[in-house]
Image (cartoon, helix red, strand yellow):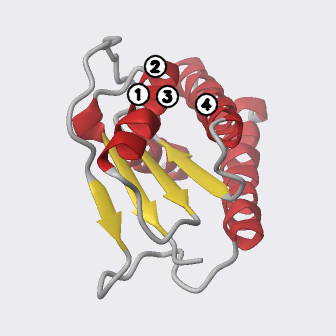
Amino acid sequence: MLCACLIGILAISGYVGADRQQTAQMTAAPVVRRSGQETPYDGMSFEDIRRRQSENRKQELSILADVIDDVTVNQATRDQANEQKLQIIECMEMETKIETALAYLGYAQTAAVYTQDHVMVILKENALEQEESVRVIDAVGSISGCEAKDIRIILAKK
């Protein structure tokens, strides 16, 4: 029962079964400024954000590994847990690719949070010109396969 609940929670949180279509068309960038909007990352350094992500993912992977290794759990549930584990690993790889690409574009301090249907990019910048926003959206979209409407840029003040 616990295994089924965990798998349901992970499915709801976006780790299960979303197909995306690649898109080459990028439009106006949805840039969010941190003013009056609180996020779970408020007041955290980029190192803290990465550490928190890593700890959360390690915990999720550990729980899924326990389900996969539990011989008392039916095979369908174990297969589903294994698929979710692979999707989490793919998310982690995608975040690294996005952060690396943004570093090449000149954004030294970034954090990417990727799920099956959207990407949130946190940049340590006071402001972005429209051209810069489009360049970030283009890079993130080409790597992730997400459409511009599914990519959110959050600016963390320098």
**How many C-alpha atoms fall within 10 Å of the one at disc 3: few (<14), some, or many (≥20)?**
some
C-beta proximity under 8 Å, tags 2 and 3: yes
Q: Which of the pair 19/35 is nearer the observer? A: 35
Cα separation, mark 2 vs mark 3, equals 5 Å
Name the residue beneath numbered marker 3: 139
Q: Which numbered marker is on residue 94?
A: 4
Disc nearer the start of the sequence (4/3): 4
Tell me the quarter of the picture where residue 158 sits.
Answer: bottom right
92 or 37: nearer the eye? 37
According to the picture, the residue beneath numbered tag 1 turns out to be 138
- Kindly check if marks 1 and 2 are in contact, taking CB atoms under 8 A apart as contact: yes
At horizontal 36% and vertical 27% (from top left) the residue drawn is 146
Residue 32, quarter of picture: bottom left
Q: Report, in whole angstroms, how far the alpha carbon at label 2 lies from the one at label 4.
A: 11 Å
Q: Which mark is residue 142?
A: 2
Q: What's under tag 3, amino acid-wise?
A: Ala
Q: Tell me where residue 101 sits by quadrant.
A: top right
For mark 3, give the secondary structure. helix
